Image (tube, rainbow, N blue to C red):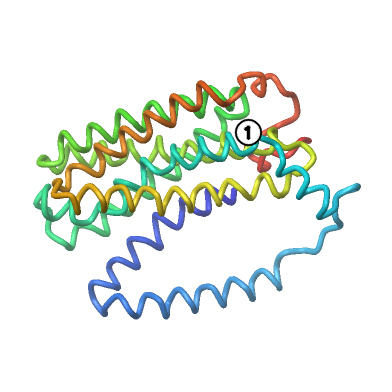
Amino acid sequence: WVMAGLSVANVLGVPGATALGQAVGWRWMFVIVAVCAALCVGATAWLVPSVPAPAGASVGRELRGLASGRLWATVAVGVIGFAGMFALYTYIAPLLTEVAGLEERWVPAVLALYGVGMVIGTLVSGALTDRDPVGTLRLSFGLSAVSLAAVALTASWAPVMIVFLFCVAVSGSGIAPSLQVLLVDSAPTAPQLAGSLNHSALNMANAMGAWVGAAAIGAGASLRTPPLVGAGIALAGLVLAFLLVRRDVAARPGVRADDGGSPR
């Protein structure tokens, strides 16, 4: 549900922030983010109950779990896989306005549709991950690669490209639930810390995808290039998912995506 919340934020927060930024200037968006963060701190203190630590849990035990090579291989797969989506998402506004020819006022609506796709992808992937996390991860990478390439090829035709943008959102967000389960399974003695690395992979991929896209544009490539580069990155993630991620996790009983991948 945490990942679903992130997806819902892309339905409401990102389009809303884009529209407000267009109206009042981008600096005010940082003020609004700060206010929202303060509200979240207060809501967390008020609404989130205190729970006892799991039996046998300790900081040392969690840190020792980081020695797992399988854990870091899974993190690497996640970074590469997510980066393909962010290579596109970072430049989605100029792609829509300068290549597809949409007016700027339509950008928030497209971003909202993208967010809806992320919500759907997260929920569908969560259900599939309960049955086969490795297969779901590989499927998400494959569909992401195809969808990103399709965005690059159809960028001049706005209606068609928007359909494929939606497909990118569905497939890209589908990576997160399966990766969460695989990370926890990779370090059974450090489930809390291992699970948190899902967001670490997400944020490293955000930086990597944006940087790769910027490097391509800075080298003189067109705005069609970031999604095409993203397709290549997603394809690399698919290859790594076959090489580095063990299939036997699919048969592990008691691990589900809807509870963060923790053993029941």
Which residue is more in the foreground, 162 or 189?
Answer: 189
Residue displayed at 31% across by 34% down: 231
Q: Is residue 113 visible?
A: no
Which residue does the image show at 66% across and 34% down from the upper left?
Answer: 69
Q: Position of residue 41 (x, y in %)?
A: 62, 73
Residue 114 vs 137, above or below: the answer is: below
Residue 164 location, x and y as percent? Answer: 26, 36
Q: Residue at x 55, y 51 (%)?
A: 200
Q: Quadrant of the C terminus?
A: top right
Left or right, 57 with respect to 173, comes to: right
Residue 20 is drawn in which quadrant? bottom left
How many numbered dots are placed on residues in this image? 1
Q: Nearer the viewer, residue 175 or 130?
A: 175
In the picture as drawn, the residue positioned furthest to the right comes out as 55
Tell me if residue 114 comes above or below residue 252 in the rendering: below
**Residue 156's spot in the image, x, y percent?**
10, 41
Q: Quadrant of residue 144?
A: top left
Q: Is residue 198 above or below residue 49?
A: above
Query: Where residue 157 appears, x then y in whole percent?
Result: 11, 40
Q: Amino acid at mark 1?
A: Leu
Neighbours of disc 1 within 10 Å: few (<14), some (14-19), many (20+): many
Q: For this view, does 233 lie left or right of residue 80?
A: left
Residue hosting label 1:
182
Question: Could you tell me if residue 206 is visible in this image?
Answer: yes
Q: Is residue 224 left or right of residue 251?
A: left
* Residue at point 77%, 63% (across, down): 49
Q: Is residue 213 above or below residue 41?
A: above
Circle 1: element type: helix
Find residue 16 and report its image quarter. bottom left
